Amino acid sequence: MMDVMRCTALLFIPLLVVGAAEIGGSTVRTVYIMSIGHGLDQYVANRLTRERVLEVVADPARADAILTDGLGKPLEYVLEKLHPTPKPAEPEDTDSESSADASDTKTSRPKKVTTNAEPMTSTFGRGKGTLFLVDARSRAVLWSIYERPKRYTPDQLDHTAKRVVDRLKQDLAGK
């Protein structure tokens, strides 16, 4: 009797596991949702999780993709912190004497000025209804949708999130 119950339970396990989605040639299993205007991010996270479309993670470093309502400097900053662009290797000196001479005398080279300051994020011009699913490593926009809520009431935001997730599921199934 116990063996039959175990076998039956094992048959239902795949139904509980969130599957991988193939979007634009990238495999997406986990998504981090950046703050979206009027709290729509909370409703989309709820729908994605409840309908088992993608696994929503709270740590952006664990995400395969990022869902956001804006592209540009703030998103680039987040992606650069998560997955820095590899720096080109500096050329090595082949002449050992010139290396020894260079170490004896200090030469002043102009240094690159880099700023690690986070760019200012403005909500002006955001939250207009367009959402983007961006690959966290390649930084390519994998999917997007324009779905603007008619009103910003909780019921309307949930309805908008449902339409967004339904469209994502539809686009994933069509591939």
Image: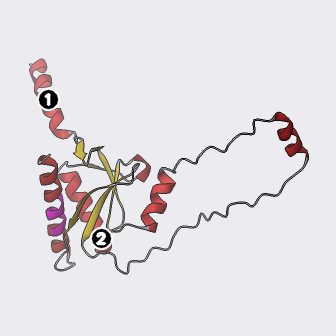
Q: Give x and y (percent) for residue 172.
A: 16, 49
Q: Which residue is mark 1?
A: 9
Q: Nearer the viewer, residue 68 or 135?
A: 135
Q: Amino acid at mark 1?
A: Ala
Q: Amino acid at mark 2?
A: Gly
Query: Which quadrant would the N terminus be assigned to in this image?
Result: top left
Describe the element under mark 1 as helix, strand or loop.
helix
Judge the density around disc 1: few (<14), some (14-19), many (≥20) Cα neighbours within 10 Å.
Answer: few
Residue displayed at 29% across by 65% down: 41
Comparing marks 2 and 1, which lies closer to the viewer?
2
User: Is the magenta region chiefly helix, strand or loop?
Assistant: helix
> Please, which residue is most extreme toward the right here?
104
Q: Give x and y (percent) for residue 146.
A: 20, 69
Please state if 50 lies on the left or on the right of 132 as rendered: left
What segment is highlighted magenta in the picture?
160-165
- The vertical placement of 48 against 1, above or below, is below
Q: Give x and y (percent) for residue 66.
A: 35, 56
Residue displayed at 13% across by 20% down: 2
Picture quadrant where residue 99 is located? top right
Query: Which quadrant would the C terminus be assigned to in this image?
Result: top left
Picture quadrant where residue 94 is located? top right
Q: Give x and y (percent) for residue 152.
A: 22, 78
Residue displayed at 68% across by 61% down: 112
- The disc label shown at residue 39, or none: 2
